[in-house]
Image (cartoon, coloured by chain):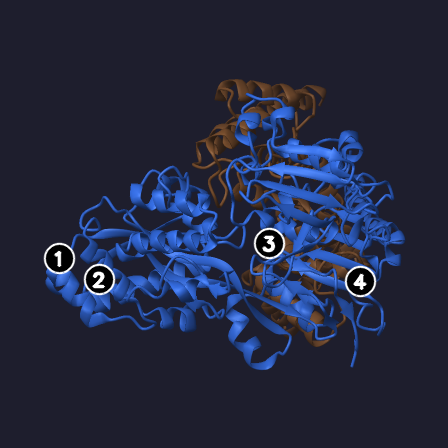
Chain colours: A brown, B blue
Amino acid sequence: MTLYVVKRLVAIIITLFMIITLTFFLMHSIPGGPFTGDKNVPEAVAKALSEKYHLDDPLWKQYFDYLKSVAQFDLGPSFKYEGMTVNELIKAGLPVSAKVGLLSVALILIVGIPIGIFAALNQNKWPDTLVMLLATLGVTIPSFVIGTLLLYVFSLKLGWTPAYGVEQWQGYILPVLALSGFSLSFVSRLTRSSMIEVFQQDYMRTARGKGLRPSKIIIKHGLRNGLIPVVTIVGPLIAAMLTGSFVIEKIFALPGIGRHFVQSITNRDYTTIMGITIFYAVILVVIVFIVDLIYGLIDPRIKLNK
Amino acid sequence: MNKSRGFVLFFVLLLAFLVVGCSAADSGKEGKKDVDKVPDAKDTPGSSDSQKIVYVLNNEADKLDPGLTAETYAAPILSNAFEGLVQMDENYEPQEGVAKSWDVSKDGLVYTFNIREDAKWSDGTPLNANDFLYSWTRVMTAATASDYSFMMYPYIKNGEKFYNGEVDVDQLGVKVVNDTTLEVTLESPVPYMMQMFAFSSYFPVQKSAVDKDPDAWHRNPETFISNGPFKVKELKFGESYTLVKNENYWGKDDVKLEEIKFSIVPELATGLTAMESNNVDGINGVPTAEIARLKANDDRFIVLPALGTTYFLLNNKVKPLDDEKVRKALALAINRKEIVENVTQGGQEPAFALIPGGMILEGQDFREAGGTYGLTETGDIEEAKKLLAEAGYPDGQGFPKLTLKYYSNDTAKKVTEALQQMWKKNLNIDLELKSAEWKVYRKEVEVHDYDIGNMGWGGDYAHPMTFFDVFASNSPNNMTNWTSEEYDKHLELAKRELDPSKSIEAMHNAEDILMNEMRILPIYHSTNVMMMAEHVKGWKRSILGNIYFRDAYVEGRGE
């Protein structure tokens, strides 16, 4: 186990290093820099700006300087937002992105799993058909369409929720609904199919034959195995909810990280592009790692050491 | 570890998410407690005579340091939190600001400002001539890396030398005579210099505030000291900026609004939803797709002329664009009326020349005096065909397949496509469309890697020179692959000439060269489209796009 953890940690560091290197050089290969604005400035001014942000250094020097500061957890100053460091930018945006993301994860699991079980129990009857129809819709409609629709109905027509921002707690309702739509549908479909498969297993028939209560059969015997596929996707799901809110954050004007990520590329805000990429990469690899560990604990068929 | 323990672990995890999720939401609520004193967007329509408004902006400004930023996104905050030596009225005539009076020497080189004795910073400390000296030398110091330093150093005597580190501050054309007298000497006369003194780069900043944190003083309400009608109360990055009335402002009796909250909503459609749900009092822009509907049904929808021109760049060295007849044929074959009415739809004016209307010089609108250079709203297709045939391409035959480039932007795309169709239909010439993301596009056009390309210019100040300078030979923004000594000469004369009418004449001569030779293809003059609730009165938005709430007030809310 310890050996496995050490191996994985080394792999994580190598992965991150490669992500940093690739992103750094790809980013610098895009034409235009952080100070290519709508209008060109005189050469002397462009020179002063480059000097201030060390953009006049050779690229390899910029790269090693950056690696050095990242190793000290310093993601550098934003090139776009003067007086903000990328660390500050992430710190300011993370609470909002995390709240929306985690609330979505909670909603997905708490609502999605029971719906899936319910559909599986009513397999091929009308409640199943109805739930799966809704789930199919949820998977196919993109989140920005859901978001815009929700805004139209609940903010414009009914006036129940604010149109933007999270200064009031009600502001979280629509973004969370819009963000979780896809995964909620996905989780309920996954739970359904996995439960249906489990219901057909021999040990389930045995359990029924023993005369156990149906609720006990479902919870103790059915769910325990039926949820293993769901656990597998919880990791990527959390990562997706934390990092996948670019569009939602823009539509609902949430001051989160996702919005800065897309904007930073347009702005060629080099340090912000790098900083947020690294931040997202860390979240992803760490969550995948944790899920792998948990997976090994839940399913005894998986031996981590091998 | 057996199965059931793993199962329990899973549910513990699930529960943990729930708890984290909920407590996060709760803490969000707690965290907002202190903010609740700031009335919410939701509450404003209720309180009928509250002098508080919420106004939506669509972009986060790069910085709120007036000496450093060149972004229009910062302007709404800067224009209301700061004030220069003078302020400009609707007609771009200077009015008193920090200076209560001024003199200009006969040769137009020396400006002497009498600063009011009761001028104060928002923290109550006195503001005097030394503050201007400090603020301006800061802008003109290369190490400060001000994005707009070139709005100052070319004008001030020895400014450029100072920027390049060749002279000391005592040789700079800015002298503090005494606390209330500032003497500014120019390199050469500048007809629009009074406007520059009202421009944001010339706003004073407080030395002691800046010294506390030179890069980030403007990110913290504690160190954000200003001198205008409003001061900063709260700055929430990516979310909102809140200004409140500045009780230390000399003209505080004129200021009626207690609070302005600028909310940042990047999606125009969301801002519009907020406006239509009465969550906010005004929005700085609306989605193009909604303009027609709003124009018809909503009294709060406003179209204001803006100081900008959208034109198509021609690569004047590429064959056959090096032929004046071809350039004219292209210009004449455009139906500009159709473009502004059916494509852009934002109340834009068809453009027949570079300089937009709205700039009054010596009592006359420069555009009106300048004429239309043979162009009309709907174009002249017969004449265009004739010219193209004379150039050797009858009915478009043999015309090479040039590229027509634009940058990835919805309006730019639609306008460019419309032009491609018009030229095909009217002149039977085929152009190949190409697009690129803005910064990539910009670089390509700069190195003349284009034939015809979508471009535009927004004025930095309300004087034709802000447009003419673009096409000067030494301009970093002239991407036409064309330069003209004669054009440059007219510009030099216009800048140097003390007699206003001669200066204006020189500018008309310059425009004549550019437009008679059709070096660019003007398409339309811009507008600003916005919405403001009818209960917000007395606000102003200049043709440069700046919004001023100094004299604004709320009356009849909820009626």
The residue at which mark 4 appears reads as B254
Marks 3 and 1, how far apart at CA:
51 Å
In the image, which is nearer the foreground, mark 2 or mark 4?
A: 4
| Protein chain holding label 3 | A
Q: Residue at x 78, y 68 (%)?
A: B553
Quadrant housing residue B416: bottom left
Q: Amino acid at mark 2?
A: Ala
Q: Reading the chain from its start, which is encountered first: label 2 or label 1? A: 2
Q: Amino acid at mark 1?
A: Ala
Q: Which one is nearer the viewer's eye here, A42 or A107?
A: A42
Q: Where does residue B96 sit, x and y in percent of width and height? A: 71, 54
Q: Is residue B282 left or right of residue B413?
A: right
Q: Where does residue B228 sit, x and y in percent of width and height? A: 76, 51
| Protein chain holding label 4 | B
Q: Is residue A239 left or right of residue B222?
A: left
Asked whether the residues under marks 2 and 4 belong to the same chain, the reply is yes
In the image, which is nearer the foreground, mark 4 or mark 3?
A: 4
Picture disc at residue B391: 1
Marks 4 and 3, how far apart at CA:
43 Å
Q: Reading the chain from its start, which is encountered first: label 2 or label 4? A: 4
Q: Residues within 10 Å of mark 1 (few under 14, many from 20)?
A: some
Q: Amino acid at mark 3?
A: Val
The residue at which mark 2 appears reads as B329
Q: Reading the chain from its start, which is encountered first: label 4 or label 1? A: 4
Picture disc at residue A247: 3
Which structural element holds mark 2? helix
The answer to whether the residue labelled 2 contacts the one labelled 1, judged by CB atoms less than 8 Å apart, is yes
In the image, which is nearer the foreground, mark 4 or mark 1?
A: 4
Marks 2 and 4, how far apart at CA:
55 Å
Q: Quadrant of the N terminus of chain A?
A: top right
Asked whether the residues under marks 4 and 3 belong to the same chain, the reply is no
